[in-house]
Image: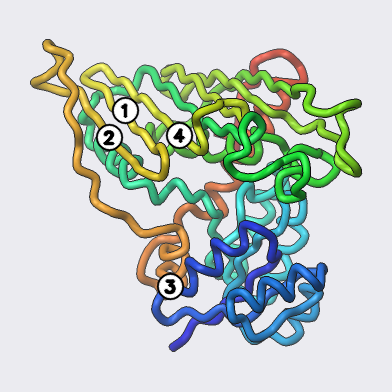
Amino acid sequence: MTLRLAILGTGGMAANHARAFAAIKGVKVVAGIDSRPDVLAAFTAAHGIGRGFASLDAALEWGGFDAVANVTPDAAHFATTLPCLAAGKHVLCEKPLATNAADAQAMADAAEAAGVVGMVNLSYRSVPALIAAQGMVARGDIGAVRHLEASYLQSWLAQAAWGDWKTETQWLWRLSQAHGSKGVLGDVGIHILDFATFAAGIGVAEITCRLAVFDKAPSGRIGEYRLDANDSATLQLRLDNGALATVTATRFAPGHLNDLRLRLYGDKGGLEVGFERGVSSLRACTAPDLETATWRCIDCPPVPSVYESFIAAIRGEGPADPSFARGAALQYLLDAAEISADTGRAHTLTGTGR
């Protein structure tokens, strides 16, 4: 039986969703949804999608789909996902799940109550080296985690490898709080926080954060876009077991188009995970190589993409992971980071935030 999918929000990232779902056997993208007629028409034509709707209400009234890929801007995730869940539609939502923890938790609760699959598009969960590293940590190969370092490095504010951010709306909105952006912290900080804490398998007890916005245009504005969303973030974490972590994210890292790095150290060994230029790698220094500090490369088998995992979860063939619940937990971390940045103090996580 064909699984029918609608794509909500048909901007730049939506093309990735359309191509990925079209490549999965038994899946058909049947509709695009966007209030911008020109953007919608170009998207449906480019991907051979038969129907286009100017509003989510109109699409839900038609109802001829089983699942939704929500590719709207961050600030629209909450308001657009809840009606889909209420209509019994499975949802893969772009990250971050919401712009605050309360909304993210409400989305997770709504998905559970509706009995549908709710997943968040943490695309780096499909990095083979990360999954292999997580397995090694869980097996105790490096012993008790004591220290980790993680970074997400982009350079599109410093080099035009992805286009001209000063003239293209797909980049400008990411720099403007009024247009729904939570800055680099919300945009890619969520990825590196998931990358690090998923691999470590340990919750966060305390977080300290500094955020920076750099001068990028006269008066900090380009047209309707006030450039006030954070460009760089540095975080220090204390994990539940007492381990310490440093996590950084920036759009000012010339020479790094879209690179993630993670170093995990335990009392019995260390791991280094890399994802650079779309290629993942894993190195380990464990017994019996500790005395000579010899690092060896680890083979990492391929893993399903988040898109494939979403379809498998709908079909009952795999777990709904990363789930809306995971997305909500990460949003608690993002909120805590913002509180720390605003107050200049460490923020302790309690309750659901742990």
Which of marks 4 and 2 precedes in the sequence?
Answer: 4
- Few, some or many residues within 10 Å of mark 4 (<14, 14–19, 20+): many
State the separation of the CA atoms marked 2 and 4.
12 Å
Asked if residue 296 lies left or right of residue 332, the reply is left
Q: Are marks 1 and 3 in contact (CB under 8 Å)?
A: no
The spot of residue 172 in percent (x, y) is 76, 43
Q: Is residue 73 above or below residue 49?
A: above
The circle drawn on residue 260 is 4
The circle drawn on residue 272 is 1
Residue type, numbered disc 4: Leu
> Which residue has dot 3 on it?
23
Q: Secondary structure at mark 2?
A: strand
Residue type, numbered disc 3: Ala
Which of marks 1 and 2 precedes in the sequence?
Answer: 1
Residue 35 placement: quadrant: bottom right
Q: Residue at x 65, y 78 (%)?
A: 45
Q: Secondary structure at mark 4?
A: strand
Residue 244 placement: quadrant: top left
